[in-house]
Image (cartoon, grey):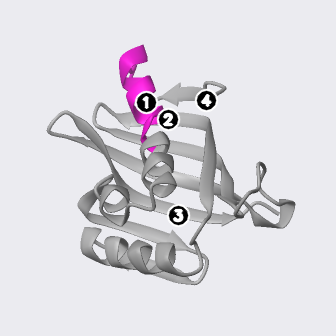
Amino acid sequence: MTPPRTSAAVAPTAEEQAAVAAVPLQIVAAWQRHDADAFADVFTPDGTMILPGLYRSGRDEIRDFMATAFAGPYQGTQVTGEPFHLTFLGADTALLLTKGGVLAPGAETVAEDQQIRASWLLTKRDGRWLLAAYQNTPAH
């Protein structure tokens, strides 16, 4: 993975930068297992997820949506994402931007018309970086 370009309102340590940039890997791993619980647990209890045409608020709604999606339209899919920009807004708040998308079953690259750009607003709670808000949009 290419390290994301970083800017900061505060000076984060390399360890903090790596911890924030690793959050998408937790989502990728949960998706790989089609584990809606692990997917939702990356979010704060009151976290939000916005996808084109979709808004979910709170871990329970996110978990329920993903469980249904993994059994339906996302069955057999994988997801990929690569950070390209990271900004620390404070000691416990960061904004991460990624590019990627959902991989169709058996695909090794995201189809051009399925590529996305995403924003991840993260907060550090009890020593763990969690997703407070996620939103994606088509890249093209």
Q: Which residues are magenta?
A: 10-23
Residue 13 seen in the figure:
no
How crowded is the residue under tag 3: few (<14 C-alpha within 10 Å), some, or many (20+)?
Answer: some
Q: Tell me the residue that label 3 is attached to.
A: 135
How crowded is the residue under tag 4: few (<14 C-alpha within 10 Å), some, or many (20+)?
Answer: some
- Residue 125, quarter of the rendered image: top left
Q: Tell me the residue that label 2 is attached to.
A: 87
Q: CA distance from mark 4 to mark 1?
A: 16 Å
Amino acid type for the residue under numbered disc 1: Ala
Amino acid type for the residue under numbered disc 2: Thr
Q: Position of residue 79 (x, y in %)?
A: 60, 55
Residue at the spot 33% in from the left edge and 62% down from the top edge: 40
Mark 4 residue element: loop
Q: Tell me the residue that label 1 is attached to.
A: 9
| Mark 2 vs 4, N-terminal side | 4
Q: Tell me the residue that label 4 is attached to.
A: 4
Amino acid type for the residue under numbered disc 4: Pro
Is residue 18 shown above or below 109? above
Q: Quadrant of the N terminus?
A: top right
Q: Position of residue 99 (x, y in %)?
A: 68, 48
Asked if residue 111 lies left or right of residue 20, the reply is right
